[in-house]
Amino acid sequence: MHATPTARKPRGARTRTVLAALTAATALLAGLGTASAAPAQPSTLAADKVLINDEFNGSTLDTSVWSAGDSDVDQPTGWIWRYLTKQTPDGSVAHPDQVKLANGEVDLGLSANPYLDHKYRAGYISTQGKKSFLYGKVEATIKVSGGLGLWPAFWMLPADTTASDIDNSTALPEVDIFEILGTEGSKTDYMTLHNVRPEDKTGCTFTTTDLSAGYHTYGLDWQPGKMTWLVDGVARCTTTKAVPSEPMFLILNNSAGGCASWGGCIQPSTPLPSHLYVRNVKVTQPDSLMVNDPAGGVTYAGAWTYGGGRGYGDHGDDVHYTRTNGDSVSYTFNGTGVDLLTEKFSDLGTADVYVDGTLRRTVDLTSPTRQVQQTVFGVSGLAQSVHTIKVVKRSGTYLVVDAFRTRS
């Protein structure tokens, strides 16, 4: 569900500079290889744990997972109210009376029932403020209604989205798991990643027979540096460009965007009320995740260099390294624990490791022999939430970073 955005200041933009004075010969003597550009690399997922698995049994929505409409639907304060009312008055606005559970599914309706100066009211549910996640696999089994002007969607926004973001069209990045237009006969699934920079927008379309004719499972496999969209278990689109590295939440809605919108006009021939039936939503996350040093979300501050093809047995056969005391690397993750993997050798020194801004340990990385993929720091038992690990070079000729391992 997206209108053309204005530019937004990137969250946590990465800074990485190359230490020009470090020659290729010096790097080779240090066992670090020649400097080169770091390739985008997905990380390794382990066994999954279930974060959400809602089959919509019973007669009421699970409010520990979902909200229906805005918490105060009669006031123009809620962010989804602000989003949908940016459409024209012949469009729809979210209202909780359009969310109904029966027969093991949730029905998100769209009815010709005017509300707040809008011609239609629509069913909408989201996990905002209740369930957000960073990386994992999302799947939902859904049946859309067909008809001119209908615009159902399954999408994600950052967990820190505010009303101001909506007002200024800066609620980005936005991940559309699917958008389907009734004006196109419900034959095309639009799978899109809208980014802070318009030139980083990526995605695909999947065109088939009428998607409103039955239930289909729509999914997204989200890894560091890589997103893959799936329809009925088949990969239909993949991107490695500007993949989000921040927690996001889920949104499902039935909608009429209005005649001036991409969704087009509801017509007299459009069957109303329309329905978006959702049989289940499942989100799984890896119990542990190996995040390689060039992966999305790993942020370097200072004079770091990428060294690939070392041949020493590093994770991904590569590392980042710096010779400047005070340089740092940070990684923000959603989980309960994190490990730092790096090299130990005679030309390394010490580094301070912080978790959520608190110094946890100064680690000694020296060793008379080279040791790679060494877990030199680990913490567990954190609250299941978003945390940041930061490593700061303190002494020695080099600080080498190989990978992080996070736990959920």
Image (cartoon, grey):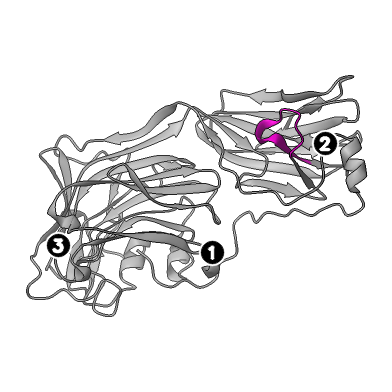
In the image as oriented, which residue stretches furthest toward the top?
A: 368
Amino acid type assigned to the residue bearing label 1 in the image: Asp
Residue 394, given in percent of the width and then of the height, sits at: 86, 36
Helix, strand or loop under label 1: helix
Residue 76 can be seen, yes or no: no
Between the residue at mark 1 and the residue at mark 3, the CA separation in whole angstroms equals 31 Å
Amino acid type assigned to the residue bearing label 2 in the image: Leu
Specify whether residue 255 is painted magenta: no
Residue 236 in the figure: left or right of residue 227: left
Residue carrying label 3: 146
Residue 50 can be seen, yes or no: yes
Residue carrying label 1: 200
Residue 367 placement: quadrant: top right
Residue 365, given in percent of the width and then of the height, sits at: 83, 26
Residue 62, given in percent of the width and then of the height, sits at: 26, 38
Q: Earlier in the sequence, mark 2 or mark 3?
A: 3
Residue carrying label 2: 399
75 versus 265 height, above or below: above
Disc number at residue 118?
A: none
Q: Which residues are magenta?
A: 309-320
Residue 371 placement: quadrant: top right
- The quarter in which the N terminus is drawn is bottom left
Q: How many numbered discs sit on the rendered protein?
A: 3
Amino acid type assigned to the residue bearing label 3 in the image: Gly
